[in-house]
Image: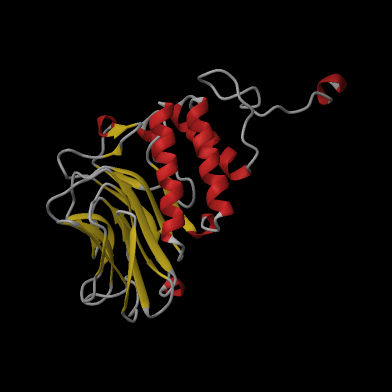
Amino acid sequence: MALAAKIPFRHPYAAGFPGLGSQPMPTDADALDYLDRMAAADGAGVEVGVATAVSAFVRDTKAAGVFDALKACCILAGARTLAGALVPLRGDAPTPYGFVSGDFSRTAGLADPDATSYLDSNYTTPASLKDDCHFAVYTDALPSTQQMLAGANAGGSLAQQLYCKDTLANGLLNSGSTTANAGTGHAGFHGCNRPNSETQQVRAGGDTVSDLYASVGVPDLSVFLFARNLSGVASLTNDVNILFYSIGSSLDLAKLDSHVTAYVTAIGAAI
């Protein structure tokens, strides 16, 4: 017993990640924790390239000062199974409604071709973040009609929404009558952000635009993905694919875009 007590603990990933060869494990505690939880849900660890991409995303978003703003965040590409994909990087796990294993792709994320499924993020923007909030998703969608990416709407002026329509990405935070538009294409990163009580921002297609509109409050509703939460009912569900989402406090949309896009590129090369 005394001899056994002297044997140092070895992390399950210490000899390298299951998959292609061997590579030193990430040292960041948040990346390790996420990879452990994802492996438990998947029943196996991910490949070296996927683990490296996760580690780089966590490291780089921390260095860019945006990691702490991700209050609810899921990386919906890279995991081995749907169960692993629904493990959150940060915050509570989302609740899926209608998705089945065949709706998940390791490189293309999650999508329901029947356009009936959605995720409840289980995150309700607190009143204290009324003037300090964001939504963001990464999608390969190229819709020709309105596609709701994320949202919560209590009706009237209490709305938070991010969606695609025609050739623009549209978003509004904390207002029911003014919408900011950005981008000339849909594929890739989409986000909306409120850095203060007077400004709302939208980013898509590598462009960020701002407009001035005073915030009026946030709906006391959990934010849905692939739909909007319209006073407790999923509205405008769609067949768009989502590879990443985050919800939380205000951040630099361009910085988050850069690191999410780099992650998606790395996953495409690793799998």
Q: Is residue 32 above or below residue 200?
A: above
Query: Given the current orientation, which residue lies at the most extreme left position?
Result: 145
Q: Position of residue 167 (x, y in %)?
A: 17, 56
Q: Is residue 258 above or below residue 228?
A: above
Q: Residue at left 64%, top 28%?
A: 24
The answer, for residue 13, to whether it is visible in the render is yes
At x 35%, y 77%, the residue is 217
Horizontal side of 54 relative to 205 (left or right) equals right
Closer to us: 30 or 120: 30
What is the quadrant of the C terminus in the image?
top left
Q: Is residue 11 left or right of residue 69?
A: right
Image quarter where the N terminus lies is top right
Give the answer, above or below, for where 253 lies relative to 263.
Answer: below
Image point 50% across, 36% down: which residue?
Answer: 53
Residue 250 at x, y = what percent? 45, 66
Which is more toward the observer, 217 or 177? 177
Which of the 4 quarters of the picture holds residue 87?
A: top left
